[in-house]
Image (cartoon, rainbow, N blue to C red):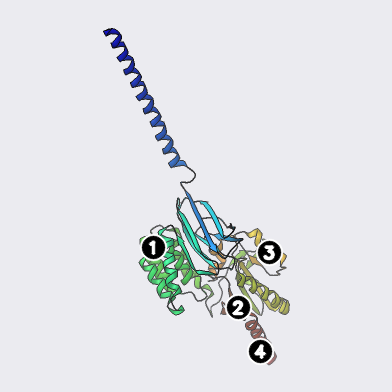
Amino acid sequence: MQLCGFESRSRHEAIRKGFMKTKAFFSLCAFLALLLLSSCGSDNGKFKLEGRLRHMNQAEFWVYSPDAGIAGFDTIPVRNGRFSYELELPNPATLVIIFPNYSEQPVFAEPGGSVYIKGDASNMREMIIEGTEDNELMTELRMDLNETVPPDVPKVVRHFIEEHTTSLASIYLLKRYFIQNPTPDYKTAQKLTSLLLKDNLGNGQLIQLQKQLPRLQGGALKSKIPAFVAYDVKGKKVTEKSLNGKLNVVSVWASWSYQSTDMQRRLQSLHKKYGDKLAVLSICLDGRPADCKQRVERDSLKWPTVCDGRLWDTPLLIKLGLSDVPANLLIDEKGVVIDRNIQPDKLEEVINKEMLKRKVDALLK
């Protein structure tokens, strides 16, 4: 009986040890599987954006990234005011959403992060973006700007940038308020760029911006436009010599900006009126050159249009010191800039006056 009892205890011990080994094995497998999922799972580098806007049923938002977070443009469908968008994202990036009323809203995306947008489609200025620190900071700033008189806006924005030097929001604000503006402030932009670079060593956007800023003044009033070489959507070479009219216009447009496409329609009417006396060159900031080419052909635009899909980094845009949409330069027959960033509704009036002036001058000679 003792032997039998010994054998029984040994068997039970063996079973217990075997169970423990098996349990340890499966625990190890579970741990390795969890580790694999956490390191290689599809959600690890995904950014998710969701939201709901009241007083909006069905629509479509456009989205692009000024810092190459996505290539070209993407779309976000809206159903019953709700929308959702996911993006594989290896690095933090800025996304700019274009709403049906052509207003823009930046969203600062982080790998693995999520953001929720809520508000009223009839009052986009009160929109709230929650989910990451940069977006919540931007929401707070937007609310402050809603209560700020226009002359004080640059001061408030500059203070925000100086207080938040490591935020993606500061880089966006620097470009939006001091460069991509009808009246850019390049001096302040240069100071702020240097400030941000101190806390963001190696940031490609800021390094590129620091190099570009001295050249952005190429289209200053009373200055001669610099020499350039570009290619239009039909593959034709375009240079400064292409601006050979009695009066010349360089215009910047994008399909998502109603004001800029309205400017194109007005230029088309003026070009028909004055013929070769008015030379026009357009720069399109659409992300898809093929779509731009289609639109140019559909609208029968007779002048060259440059579109390389590089948005704000289009070399010709930078060389001519243009940084807004819509934007334009009015250039005389000697290649000197005589006006810039004329509002689309004033463009026809200004060009007609300039053409009349040249006609009178010719008669008096």
SS for dot 1: helix
Quarter of the figure with the N terminus: top left
Residue 265: image location, x then y, percent: 68, 73
**Residue occupying the point 52% across, 73% down:** 218
Which element carries disc 4, helix, strand or loop?
helix
In-image side of 185 versus 7 (left or right): right
- State which tag comes first along the sequence, 4 or 1: 1
Residue that mark 3 sits on: 295
Mark nearer the viewer, 2 or 3: 3
Nearer-N-terminus badge (2/4)? 2
Image x and y of residue 143, in percent: 44, 70
What distance separates the C-alpha of mark 1 from that of mark 2?
A: 36 Å
Question: Hey, which quadrant is residue 283 in on the image?
Answer: bottom right
Real-space Cα separation, disc 2 to disc 3, in angstroms? 26 Å
Dividing the picture into quadrants, the one containing residue 319 is: bottom right
Q: For label 2, count other residues whose C-alpha is less than 10 Å away and answer few (under 14), some (14-19) or many (20+).
A: many
Question: Do the CB atoms of the residues marked 3 and 1 lie less than 8 Å apart?
Answer: no
Whether residue 333 is visible: no
| In this rendering, position of residue 325 left or right of residue 141 | right
Q: CA distance from mark 2 to mark 4?
A: 17 Å
Identify the residue at horizontal 49%, vertical 53% (top origin). 48
Q: Nearer the viewer, mark 3 or mark 1?
A: 3
Task: Report how far apart the C-alphas of labels 3 and 1 lie in the structure.
Answer: 39 Å
Query: Which amino acid does the dot numbered 1 rest on?
Result: Leu
171 or 143, which is in the foreground?
Answer: 143
At horizontal 43% and vertical 35% (from top left) the residue drawn is 33
Query: Looking at the picture, which amino acid does disc 3 mark?
Result: Arg
Residue bearing mark 4: 361
- Residue 197: give its label: 1
Give the residue pinned by disc 2: 331
